[in-house]
Amino acid sequence: MIVKITGVKEIDRALKELERVQARKIIRRSMRTALKEMQQKAVELAPIGVSRMLRGVQHVAGELRRNIKIRAAKIKRRGEIALAVRIGEGDFKGEQFYGSFPEYGTKFQAGQHFLLRAFEATKDSVRDRTNELIRQDINETLGWWHKI
């Protein structure tokens, strides 16, 4: 589930005029703000479940929804910035390990794929919103004489 933003030459040129740290901060902040829409859609689509004790840990109904977060993701190539909408600490990790079961399914249940459906429903608007926010931040940073 990757949204790649490429082909926006004026944004690329403007980002090269900024310091690398400042450019990365603008991109990361814009992505995080835009991904909130995807996070909200994932929360809306996530199953609520029931309260129960599982592996010695008390799980409360709605806990899965409360633990859908936006986090920095692993970067595969130098110079990339990656953020992810995920459950708790990640797939099959932490106290919300069970959140991966309804997402991917098990041999006893089919996957509901609520994160994938949230991604598919919001990917275009997230990409457009990210571009818009990057443009706004660049214009604020570089000033009125450098509108993109």
Image: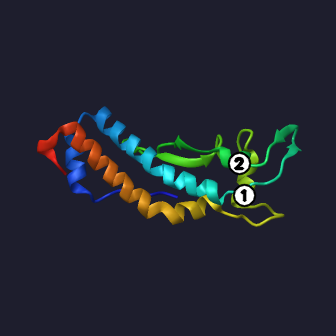
> Is residue 42 found left or right of 130 in the rendered image?
right
Identify the amino acid type marked 1: Pro
Badge 2 marks a residue whose secondary structure is helix
Observer-nearest of 100 and 64: 64
* Percent coordinates x, y for residue 40 in the rendering: 56, 53
Residue at 26% x, 57% y: name it: 8
Residue at 88% x, 37% y: name it: 56
Mark seen at residue 47: 1
> Is residue 8 found left or right of 146 in the rendered image?
right
Observer-nearest of 131 and 72: 131
Query: In the displayed structure, would residue 85 be above or below residue 118?
Result: above
Disc 1 to disc 2: CB gap under 8 Å = yes
Residue at 76% x, 67% y: name it: 110
Mark 2 is surrounded, within 10 Å at the Cα level, by few (under 14), some (14 to 19) or many (20 or more) other residues, namely many
- Sequence order check, earlier mark of 1 and 2: 1
Observer-nearest of 3 and 65: 65
Query: In the displayed structure, would residue 43 be above or below residue 141?
Result: below
> Is residue 75 found left or right of 46 in the rendered image?
left
How far separated are the C-alphas under marks 1 and 2? 8 Å
Q: Which residue is mark 2?
A: 64
* Percent coordinates x, y for residue 142 in the rendering: 19, 38
Residue at 81% x, 43% y: name it: 59
* Percent coordinates x, y for residue 146 in the rendering: 14, 45
